[in-house]
Image (cartoon, rainbow, N blue to C red):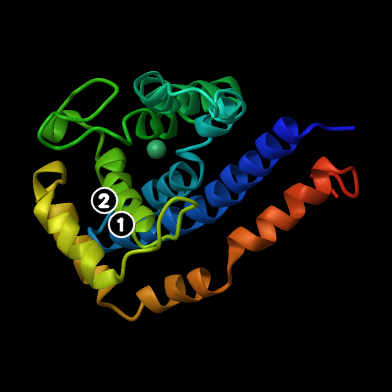
Amino acid sequence: MMNNGENNMISDMVVDFSEAISHGMIVSRFAVLVSKELGLSDEFCDKIAMAGFLHDIGKLRISEQLHLDRSKAMVVEKMKYVRMHATFSRDILAEQGFDGEICDIVYHHHENNDGSGYPCNISGDDIPLGARIIRVCDVYTALISKRSYREAFSKKVAVELMIEEAKHFDMKIFLAFLRVLHSEDNKSIEKLLEKSIEKDAADYFKKYITGETNLTS
Ligand SMILES: [Fe+2]
């Protein structure tokens, strides 16, 4: 029998898992469209599709630990820990034998164009191209998504917020992203958003936890 604390922790992990699946699918789709808009090769698009889907996989490694500490005010420590997810994502993919370029993209997906990001504080062209593309798509997707602690921003407000923080982005990529956003292709992403993938993923994960199904069936 699980106690209340364990139940709360599992509920939080279900939210993390379902948000990660939904977020990964949308970032991946955006990243491919932006890469195509920039005239990048099919081979590159395949790699960025994978990196876009899996860039936050390291968060699942820290999910349990974060929620175990829910009663304590460990804000700074938690933030430092959360920042480790990019390294964990890279490590998990490298352990699984993923292509080195995909691992590099994932490792650097929180670097900012002005050098203010993490984990390496690199800037401009020193940041792998794929990571610069994921950065733009990741920020936008996070802003337009509802989170457990806030409502989703509208598309218009999300773009305005990104323009205010434009120094974080490679301008050529940000402009390509805006073109994608206003193109017909964006409709396929809006359909993904409407499908409430998060709810489907959460239902599936809950069944997995309670033993009603397994993840490979
Ligand atoms: Fe991330």
Q: CA distance from mark 2 to mark 1?
A: 6 Å
Q: Is residue 160 left or right of residue 5?
A: left
Q: Quadrant of ligand 1?
A: top left
Q: Are marks 2 and 1 in contact (CB under 8 Å)?
A: yes
Q: Nearer the viewer, residue 78 or 215?
A: 78
> Toward which corner of the image does residue 197 lie, by quadrant?
bottom right
Q: Name the residue that disc number 1 marks.
A: 140
Residue 108 placement (x, y as % from top left) = 31, 30
Residue 150 placement (x, y as % from top left) = 40, 56
Q: Is residue 127 left or right of residue 54?
A: left
- Taking the spot 40% from the left edge, 54% from the top edge, the residue there is 42
Q: Is residue 148 left or right of residue 164?
A: right
For residue 177, above or below residue 190:
above
Assign a secondary structure to mark 1. Answer: helix
> Toward which corner of the image does residue 155 lie, by quadrant?
bottom left
- Taking the spot 61% from the left edge, 51% from the top edge, the residue there is 18
Residue 48 placement (x, y as % from top left) = 40, 46
Assign a secondary structure to mark 2. Answer: helix
Q: Name the residue that disc number 2 marks.
A: 136
- Residue 216 visible to the viewer: no
Which kind of residue does numbered mark 2 sit on? Answer: Val
- Taking the spot 16% from the left edge, 46% from the top edge, the residue there is 169
Q: Which mark is residue 20?
A: none
Which kind of residue does numbered mark 1 sit on? Answer: Tyr
For residue 11, above or below residue 161:
above
